[in-house]
Amino acid sequence: MQFLSVFIQVLFLVAAHVLALPTHNAEQATLKEATNLDDLHHHHETGLNFAPSTSLVARDTDYMSVLNYWRVRVGAPALTWSAKLQANALDTVVSGNGQMIHKLNPGTFGQVLAPGNPGSFENVFVGGWLCELPGLPGLNGCCVEWSKGWLYLGQTKHAEIVTSTAYSHIGCALANGIWGCDLGNA
C-alpha cells in the first residue's frame, strides 16, 4: 500500500513537471527580478511562488520563496530550483522510510534532512538548519524563537550547507515525515 502511494506521488511529480514546464521560466524570471531583500520579503509575504508549479511539494509549501528569502537575509545569493535535485531529494526521503538517512544521488553535492510536515518548511529551514549558527548576519536574534524544539548538539554543517555559495541550485521534498533538500550546480 505504501509503495503504491509513493509510486503515485512520483508519477504525479513527473507528469506535473512535463505538463507545467513552461511556467518555470516565467517564475525564474520573477526571481531574478527580485534582486534585494525587500523584494524577496514582499514576494515571501504575498505568497508569490518562486518555485515552479511543477510538483506537489513546490506548489503546496512554496519552499523556494521561503529558502531564498532567508538565504538573501543572511547574505547568501538566491538559489535556482532544479527538477533533478528535487527528484534526488524525494528519492532520499522516500527510501529513508521515515528515518533521516543520507543518500547522495548523482548531481547532489550537499544534502540536509530534518523531521517535518507539509506546513513546517520554514520552521525546518530556519529553526532546524540556519539556527545552528545563530550569529549569522540577518538572523538578528530570531533564533531565540525559531530554535525552540530543535536540538543541535554542536552541529553547524546543515547551516553551512544551506548558506553555502558553492551551490547554485536546490530541490527539496517531503515524504514519510522527513524534509530533504539536495543542493548542486545544475
Image (cartoon, rainbow, N blue to C red):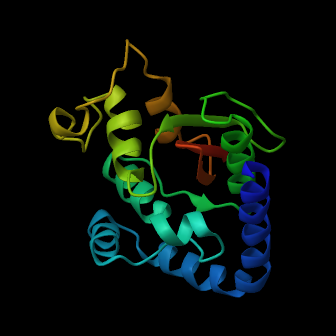
Q: Is residue 161 visible?
A: yes
**Which residue occupies the foreground of this view, 99 or 53?**
99
Picture mark count: 0
163 lies above or below 66: above
Which residue corresponds to the image point at 32% horizontal and 28% vertical from the top-left? 150
* Residue at x 45%, y 50% (from the top left corner): 117
Toward the viewer: 3 or 79? 3
Q: Residue furthest top?
A: 154
Say which of 131 and 150 sits in front: 150
As drawn, is 14 to the left or to the right of 94? right
Instruction: Estimate the x, y position of residue 161 in percent, counting from the top left.
Output: 53, 34
Q: Residue furthest front?
A: 1
Residue 42, horizontal then vertical, whole percent: 27, 74
| Relative depth, front residue between 56 and 51 | 56
| Above or below for 6 versus 141 | below
Apparent side of residue 66 relative to residue 20 in the rendered image (left or right): left
User: Which residue shows up at 38% across the image and 35% down it?
Assistant: 128
Q: Quadrant of residue 98?
A: top right
Residue 10 in which image quadrant: bottom right
x and y, in percent, of residue 46 in the image: 29, 78
The answer to which image quadrant residue 143 occupies is: top left
Identify the image quadrant of the C terminus: bottom right
Decide if residue 185 is in sight here: no
Residue 119 is situated, as x and y percent measured from the top left of the image, at: 39, 57
